[in-house]
């Protein structure tokens, strides 16, 4: 099995069986995101313990890349500080948008998203959850859009 097959399998697995799918009760922070190009709709719920993301859930509907990215993100940021989550977002953003971006081992399963950069129209699908997470962490009320 080559690396592309492995990445594809991770995306398919997280799309079919998304981790952390569902809601969190108040006082969890929440934000809604929408990708008009693809029709992806997502709500991210975040429970904070001080500056640490204690729990994160998401719900919505979207393409396989959008759902898989949200699932992977939810696993990756739980237990991390806001600063760590933001640093992870920066690494993922580079992975999605820069052809020469390395895939550091610290990304773990998130490295599966690197194949998305070969399809520029799908980058917004993979990044929607990250923008929505940032809005939830900042207490945003207005929906996030990738347009």
Image (cartoon, rainbow, N blue to C red):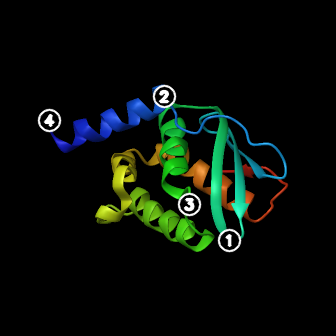
Q: Earlier in the sequence, mark 1 or mark 3?
A: 1
Q: Position of residue 91 (x, y in %)?
A: 43, 66
Drawn side of residue 143 relative to residue 104, left or right: right
User: The N terminus lies in which quarter of the figure?
Assistant: top left
Q: Earlier in the sequence, mark 1 or mark 4?
A: 4
Q: Would you say the residues marked 4 and 2 are in contact, meaning their CB atoms lie under 8 Å apart?
A: no
Judging by the rendered image, the residue that carries numbered circle 1 is: 51
- 37, 17: nearer the viewer: 17
Residue 79, label in figure: 3
In the displayed structure, 99 sits above or below 82; it is above
Question: How many other residues sit within 10 Å of disc 4, few (<14), some (14-19) or many (≥20)?
Answer: few
- 78, 108: nearer the viewer: 78
Element type where label 1 sits in the image: loop
Depth check, mark 3 against mark 4: the one in front is 3
Q: Residue at x 83, y 54 (%)?
A: 142
Q: Position of residue 40 (x, y in %)?
A: 63, 36
Judging by the rendered image, the residue that carries numbered circle 4 is: 1
Depth check, mark 1 against mark 4: the one in front is 1
Residue 17, label in figure: 2
Depth check, mark 1 against mark 2: the one in front is 1
Q: Would you say the residues marked 1 and 3 are in contact, meaning their CB atoms lie under 8 Å apart?
A: no
Distance, label 4 to label 2, CA atoms, is 22 Å
Distance, label 3 to label 4, CA atoms, is 32 Å
Q: Residue at x 79, y 49 (%)?
A: 143
Q: Is residue 48 visible?
A: yes
């Amino acid at each position: 099995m080559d690396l592309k097959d492995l990445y594809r399998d991770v995306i398919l697995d997280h799309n079919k069986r998304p981790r952390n799918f569902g809601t969190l009760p108040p006082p969890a922070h929440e934000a809604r995101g929408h990708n008009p190009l693809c029709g992806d709709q997502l709500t991210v719920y975040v429970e904070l313990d001080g500056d640490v993301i204690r729990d994160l859930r998401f719900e919505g509907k979207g393409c396989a890349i959008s759902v898989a990215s949200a699932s992977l993100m939810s696993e990756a940021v739980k237990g991390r500080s806001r600063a760590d989550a933001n640093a992870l977002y920066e690494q993922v953003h580079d992975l999605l948008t820069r052809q020469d971006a390395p895939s550091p081992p610290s990304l773990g399963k998130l490295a599966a998203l690197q194949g998305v950069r070969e399809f520029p129209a799908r980058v917004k699908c993979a990044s929607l959850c990250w923008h929505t997470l940032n809005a939830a962490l900042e207490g945003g009320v207005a929906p996030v859009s990738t347009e």
